[in-house]
Image: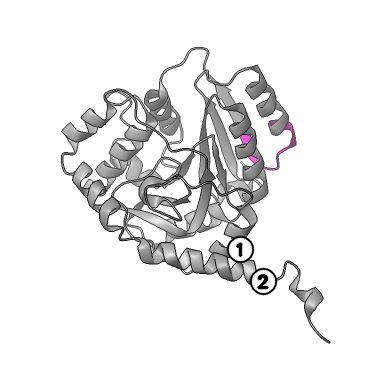
Amino acid sequence: MNQAGASWPVILVPVGTNEDALDGCLAALDAGTPHGTRVWLADDAQAGPRGLALIRHWLGTTRLQAAHTRRSQPLGEAAHLQQALQACGNADVVVLASDARPVPGWLTQLAACLASDAAIATATPWCNAGEVAAWPRIGEIVVLPDALGRLADACAHLPADYPPLPSAVAHAVLLRGLARVAAGGVDGVSYQSWYAALIDLSLRMAGLGGRNVLCDNAFVLRDAESAPQSGDLDALAVRWPAWHARLADCLMHDPLLPQRQRLQQALQAAERVPPQPDLFVTP
């Protein structure tokens, strides 16, 4: 492990079947993540021939400290995530969807969020398809084409409040390693999807005194939300009977509206700045 990689959380990408989205994710990781960061592409026998070729090419060119593992037979989303996170020990880990595109600066800002308060157990960035962490409108999917650079500029100038979330959201979440281990890790038996398993894990971490927060100066793009598999929502309701009501209350009252508006204002300000302001300065 090199010094550069050791200073950042591990990025764990559970590989999916959408090859075009995976290609975009890997390109965005290269463009917006500190060199030497450890990235693990954990493949539960999901990638097809083109996906495997994309991964091989990327591994040969990336300046990130990347590795790819592939199971011969699928284990299942939640069980595979459980296995992968167990292998990470007590390291801080970002679980990143393989169809997500992180905006430059995202990992720096997530790491700063986790470092700001030892009680923070999970940090989730904004996402255009992020349910309660959705931007520009809560609970909606809004296509934001070619927005990486503009959103990076806007986020770089935002102060951070790190407001609370009802739970982690599955597009991207930084998990504090010690809190994850103390909570027992991912439950790969009770849940099928890692969408539901991450919600459950974040609620158990909160039950031990941790905080689930929005990292409101980081952004990850995505075309669609994660979804539970059959039985997952029922299992969540049985284990956490108050969670659905808290989620519904958040969606109805939008307590994150001030942070949402502040990002909108920062984006508008960034768009008014000339692309090369030094060329327009009068001597």
Q: Which residue is mark 1?
A: 153
Q: Residue at x 16, y 44 (%)?
A: 242
Residue sitting at the far top: 73
Task: Please provide percent x and percent y for residue 251.
Answer: 29, 51
Task: Please provide percent x and percent y for residue 148.
Answer: 61, 52
Q: Is residue 104 above or below residue 45?
A: below
Q: Residue at x 65, y 17 (%)?
A: 49
Tell me the crowding category of disc 2: few under 14, some 14 to 19, or many 20 or more residues within 10 angstroms, Cα based: few
Secondary element at image label 1: helix
The Cα atoms of the two marked residues, 1 and 2, are separated by 10 Å
Q: Is residue 152 above or below residue 54?
A: below
Does the stretch in magenta take in 64? yes
Are discs 1 and 2 less than 8 Å apart at CB? Answer: yes
Q: Is residue 72 above or below residue 12?
A: above
Residue sitting at the far bottom: 283
Magenta segment range?
A: 59-66
Q: Residue at x 79, y 77 (%)?
A: 280
Q: Is residue 157 above or below residue 103?
A: below
Does the stretch in magenta take in 48? no
Question: Three-letter amino acid code at disc 2?
Answer: Val
Occupied quadrant, residue 1: top right
Query: Would residue 259 be found to the left or right of residue 189 on screen?
Result: right
Query: Would residue 210 be found to the left or right of residue 130 on screen?
Result: left
Mark on residue 273? 2
